[in-house]
Amino acid sequence: MFRHSLFSLRKLSSQVLTKMEETVNKVLKESFPKAIKISTEDISGGCGQHFKIYVESEEFKGKSRIQQHKLVTGALKDYISKWHAVTIDTKVVE
């Protein structure tokens, strides 16, 4: 319950990114310079072990969903190995 309250509180507060969220966003922006949207969210309740990542880029055009996700995990390989879980969502810019 307490963990859920912290998560809800963060959602209601201004969207201040954690240091890890900022780092991941920076790496993704460097890896996908044509991306029109990149977002990273710590969904672990603040402990920094479970992230939700979204990347929307024309660089995914012609690639399968698995290939898109491999590109994202490849860009973040130094970080993902330290996390408990990651959820990745990608979209091709039309």
Image (cartoon, helix red, strand yellow):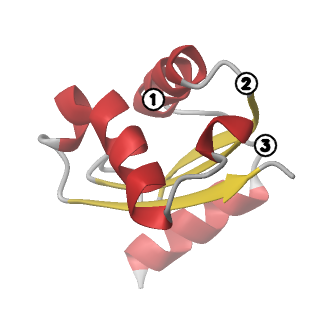
* Quarter-of-image position of residue 7: bottom right
Image position of 79 (left or right of 70): left
SS for callout 2: loop
**Extreme-front residue of the structure:** 62
Choose the circle earlier in sequence order: 2 or 1. Answer: 1
SS for callout 3: loop
From the viewer's side, name the closer residue of 63 and 52.
Answer: 63
Q: CA distance from mark 3 to mark 2?
A: 27 Å
Q: Quadrant of the N terminus?
A: bottom left
Label 3 vs label 2, nearer the camera = 2
Q: Which residue is mark 2?
A: 34
| Amino acid at the residue labelled 1 | Val
| Amino acid at the residue labelled 3 | Ser
**Extreme-left residue of the structure:** 81
Label of residue 81 in the image: none
* Quarter-of-image position of residue 39: top right
Choose the circle earlier in sequence order: 1 or 3. Answer: 3
Neighbour tally class for label 2: few under 14, some 14-19, many 20 plus, Cα within 10 Å: some
